[in-house]
Amino acid sequence: MTRKNLQNLGQLLYEEDEIKFCVDVLNYHKWDGRSSIIIDGIRHLKANTALKKLVAPIPYFLVFIDADDALRKKRVDSKDLPVFDSHPTEKAVQQNLILAADYIIDGGDDLSITQLKTIELFEKLISMYR
């Protein structure tokens, strides 16, 4: 299964029924409706809104890890990045989701630093809601 195949499948399922798509994601991860869950790879503003409603009253946060194109090209095969970014699922990411993010993490650092920043944010959020 290639990234492009996954993008196409996700886009197709999302376009058929965005709410069902979000419910299916939660069910796939066996979310029990009471505990916290981390969902990686949100690509659509409407999916973000739907997930926020579906998990309520559990606190929901959209965390966006931002990295410029030059760094992203270094981290993946640079010839593939334009192909990935041209897919409809990716176009909405930079255009809309960063504006909807509750938290933005600067992903311009070394990956280990970005990972540490992400863990620190998650620990902060968990401590706020215990």
Image (cartoon, rainbow, N blue to C red):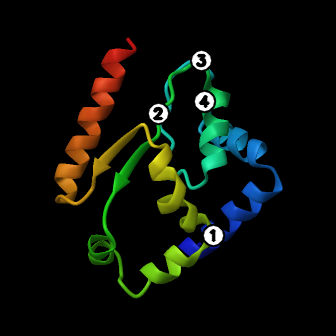
Q: Amino acid at mark 3?
A: Pro
Front residue (pair 30, 122): 122
Instruction: State the separation of the CA atoms marked 4 and 2.
Output: 16 Å
Q: Vertically, is 37 above or below 128?
A: below
Reading the image, the residue beneath label 2 is: 61
User: Contact, CB < 8 Å: mark 3 with mark 2?
Assistant: no
Q: Nearer the viewer, residue 86 or 26?
A: 86
Return the residue found at the far bottom.
79
The structure residue drawn at horizontal position 60% and vertical position 30%, both measured from the top left corner, is 31
Q: Which image quarter: residue 111?
A: bottom left
Q: CA distance from mark 3 to mark 2?
A: 12 Å
**The image quarter in which residue 19 lies:** top right
Give whichever of discs 1 and 4 has the lower sequence position.
4
Mark 4 or mark 3, earlier in chain: 4
| Mark sitting earlier along the chain (2/1) | 2
Question: What element does badge 3 sit on?
Answer: loop
The reply to whether residue 53 is visible in this rendering is yes
Give the label on residue 57, or none: 3
Residue 2 place in picture, x, y as percent: 56, 75
Query: Residue at 67% across / 61% down in the picture?
Result: 10
Residue type highlighted by circle 1: Pro
> Residue at the location (68% across, 42% down)?
22
The Cα atoms of the two marked residues, 1 and 4, are separated by: 28 Å
Disc 1 target residue: 88
The type of residue carrying mark 2 is Phe
Q: Amino acid at mark 4?
A: Trp
Q: Which quadrant of the figure has residue 110?
A: bottom left
| Earlier-in-chain disc, 4 versus 2 | 4
* Label 1 CA crowd tier, 10 Å (few <14, some 14–19, many 20+): some
* Residue closer to the observer: 27 or 68: 68
Disc number placed over residue 31 in the picture, else none: 4
Instruction: Mark 3 or mark 1: name the one nearer the start of the chain.
Output: 3
